[in-house]
Amino acid sequence: MAEAIGVVGSVISIVDLCSKILTHIRQTKDGKSEQQNLLNEVKSVKIFLVKFSEDIEDNAHLQDSHSKTVKLLLSSEGPLKRLELLLRGLLLKLTPEEGWKKYRSALTWPLEHSQVKDALFTIERCKSWISLALQNDHT
């Protein structure tokens, strides 16, 4: 039960990061296709994580059967931690600067094409790892 609470807490933290990132992406006026791709993927992972969190809460009574999966997901090299680190890095890059630079940063997309490509790949890979772990748990 305690491990399930830890997973849910981690997921809520990541969902909050997603919400902040979505806000910053929407505030940037540049409108590149990679901006839209990142927006769509962050929305997707947010929805995925909310559903995942609900599933963990609904099955918290099955702690023993989920124990290995939960430990894997919460580990420092696990997909939840990787996703959280990636999203924290994105949030730092997307957060507008202070002062007059804030207005300039709202008009220009702060990420390079390769950064967006890497972020999209990592987000998709983390979602896949989480899905596989859950499927493996249910077999």
Image: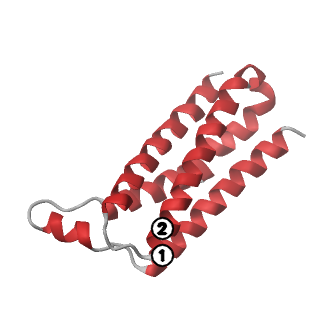
Task: Count up the numbered dots.
Answer: 2
Q: Is residue 39 above or below residue 69?
A: below
Q: Nearer the viewer, residue 100 or 132?
A: 100
Numbered disc 2: secondary structure: helix
Number of the label disc, if any, that sits on residue 3:
none
Q: Name the residue under label 2.
A: 36
Q: Distance between the residues labelled 1 and 2?
A: 5 Å
Residue extending farthest right: 139
Can residue 39 be spotted in the picture? yes
Q: Which percent across, then down, holds residue 14? A: 49, 44
Q: Mark 1 points at which residue?
A: 33
Q: Which of 29 and 71 is in front in this view?
A: 29
The residue depicted at 64 percent of the width and 31 percent of the height is 54
Numbered disc 1: secondary structure: helix
Name which quarter of the figure residue 5 lies in: top right
Look at label 2 and name its amino acid.
Gln
Q: Which percent across, then down, holds residue 123? A: 58, 60
Can residue 78 be spotted in the picture? no
Q: Do the residues labelled 1 and 2 touch (CB within 8 Å)?
A: yes
132 left or right of 21 in image: right
Look at label 1 and name its amino acid.
Ser
The C terminus lies in quadrant? top right
Q: In this view, does 105 lie above or below 27?
A: below
Tell me if mark 2 has few (under 14), some (14-19) or many (20+) residues whose alpha carbon lies within 10 angstroms of its own.
Answer: few
Q: Which percent across, then down, holds residue 133? A: 76, 47
